[in-house]
Image (spheres, grey):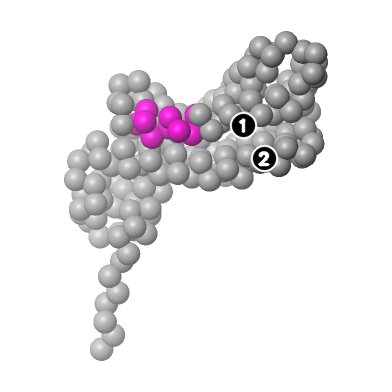
Amino acid sequence: MATRRTPDGAQRRRALCDAGIELLAEHGAKGLSHPRVDRRAGVPDGSASYYFRTRAALIHAVAERVAELDLADLRSATVPDAAISQRGAVAKLAAVVMKSLTGDGLTRTRARIELLLQASRDPAISDAFHANSQTYLRLHHELAERSQPTHADPSAVEDRALLTVMFISGLMLSAAGGSQPVIARDRLELLLTQIADSGS
């Protein structure tokens, strides 16, 4: 008789959180509950409650999972090699942005927006995204700095980094709301390059 394999705890938590991300994206925060997560994940009833005792614990775990996946994407776009061209750096950033505007990435973007709306009232959610926001800003700062002429005003770096962040945030919000068609990759790279070059 075959022995029944016990699910790996970390793997089960990830699966439950991934189901929670989908529910947040589709139904908003009100649609996130333990029973719904169980059904979406295809696991026995009570599984989500076992791993996340309260609804707050479930929401916090989902926020941490979104932050974990976001950080993995951001790390793929960070450019430690100072010799890489501005064009190469912009292409890396554009790839991450495009990923967040389509498919599973768009699902996560919608969930992230739902969570960020609650972050101002929930320090645990805010903390989950804080490190990512610093990584995100650092990436944009590096892009702006790489295209900065030696004679330019140093404050222009901060301005261009802020412009890039606001531009990308607007794209994600539009995509999440379905109000605009997804921008083409080449158009996105062109606009990011223009922002990086502004003030040069």
Which residue is the extreme one toward the front?
Answer: 150
The question of residue 127 being in magenta is answered with yes
The range drawn in magenta is 125-133
Residue 169 sits in quarter? top right
User: Residue at horizontal 41%, vertical 27%?
Assistant: 116
- Is 108 left, or right, of 99 in this rendering? left
Q: Is residue 89 left or right of residue 44?
A: right
Residue wearing tag 1: 139
- Asked if the residues shown at circle 2 and circle 1 are in contact, with their CB atoms under 8 angstroms apart, the answer is yes
Q: Position of residue 31 (x, y in %)?
A: 32, 36
Query: Mostly what secondary structure, the magenta segment?
Result: helix
Label 1 residue SS: helix
Report the disc number at residue 79: 2
Residue 162 painted magenta:
no
Q: Is residue 192 visible?
A: no
Along the line of sight, the residue nearer the viewer: 159 or 119 = 159
Query: Callout 1, which amino acid?
Result: Leu
Q: Tell me the SS state at disc 2.
A: loop
